[in-house]
Image (tube, rainbow, N blue to C red):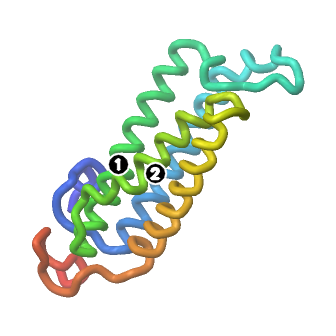
């Protein structure tokens, strides 16, 4: 499977090794993007007083576009890896939403004030997202895929 199909295709199957290596690669790209961003806008944050909260919205417009582009690309790549790994376990790729939707919702809600009903909703969503992450870690990271061909293609281990 080629680079483009691995990170941006949603068809077929991948084993544990490409799944783990792909996510390690995504992590490395994310760290590189953070380093580039820190170098590009580092001087802007020297004027912020100690104790002030730094959010993504404090970034210049160009940096926001960079962050958004990197986030979208890496999310699509991670989702593609996850879907193909689910396929290897003979599960529908739509199950990826069990992990991604609570995580995205938690990230959105985490920006709300830390009190009131939003706090409790954020806590519940965080618990659901954590349980989903644990299930995905075990299911996709450690269990072998279906032996032989399944409805999503040939066994990647046997190829």
The local crowd at label 1, few if under 14, some if 14 to 19, many if 20 or more residues have their Cα within 10 Å, is: many
- Dots 2 and 1: beta carbons under 8 Å? yes
Residue at figure coordinates x 46%, y 21% from the top left: 65
| Residue 43 tag number | none
Left or right: 65 in relation to 145: right
Residue at figure coordinates x 21%, y 62% from the top left: 1
Left or right: 114 in relation to 123: right
- Residue 44, placed above or below residue 121: above
Residue at figure coordinates x 54%, y 20% from the top left: 63
Left or right: 61 in relation to 19: right
Label 1: which residue?
Answer: 77
Residue at figure coordinates x 53%, y 13% from the top left: 61
**Residue 151, quarter of the rendered image:** bottom left
Left or right: 92 in relation to 137: left
Real-space Cα distance between discs 2 and 1?
Answer: 8 Å
Give how far across and how far down residue 57 sits, in percent.
61, 19
Secondary structure, mark 2, is: helix
In this rendered view, identify the residue nearer to me: 121 or 64: 121
Give how far across and how far down residue 28 sits, in percent.
53, 51
**Residue 150, quarter of the rendered image:** bottom left
**Residue 122, quarter of the rendered image:** top right
- Residue 48, placed above or below residue 16: above
Give how far across and how far down residue 67 sits, in percent.
50, 29
In this rendered view, identify the residue nearer to me: 75 or 119: 119
Label 2: which residue?
Answer: 26
The residue sitting at the right extreme is 50
Secondary structure, mark 1, is: helix
- Residue 141, placed above or below residue 129: below
Of callouts 2 and 1, the N-terminal one? 2
- Residue 159, placed above or below residue 45: below
Give how far across and how far down residue 9 sits, in percent.
21, 51
Report the quarter where the C terminus lies.
bottom left
């Amino acid at each position: 499977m080629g680079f483009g199909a691995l990170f941006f295709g949603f068809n077929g199957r991948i084993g544990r090794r490409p799944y783990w290596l792909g996510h390690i690669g995504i992590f490395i790209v994310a760290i590189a993007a953070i380093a580039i961003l820190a170098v590009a806008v580092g001087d802007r944050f020297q004027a912020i007083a100690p104790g002030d909260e730094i959010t993504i919205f404090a970034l210049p417009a160009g940096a926001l576009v960079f962050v958004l582009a990197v986030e979208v690309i890496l999310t699509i790549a991670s989702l593609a890896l996850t879907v193909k790994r689910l396929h290897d376990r003979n599960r529908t790729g739509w199950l990826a939403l069990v992990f991604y939707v609570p995580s995205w919702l938690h990230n959105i809600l985490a920006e709300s004030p830390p009190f009131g009903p939003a706090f409790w909703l954020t806590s519940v969503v965080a618990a659901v997202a954590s349980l989903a992450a644990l299930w995905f870690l075990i299911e996709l990271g450690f269990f072998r895929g279906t032996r032989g061909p399944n409805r999503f293609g040939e066994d990647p281990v046997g190829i």
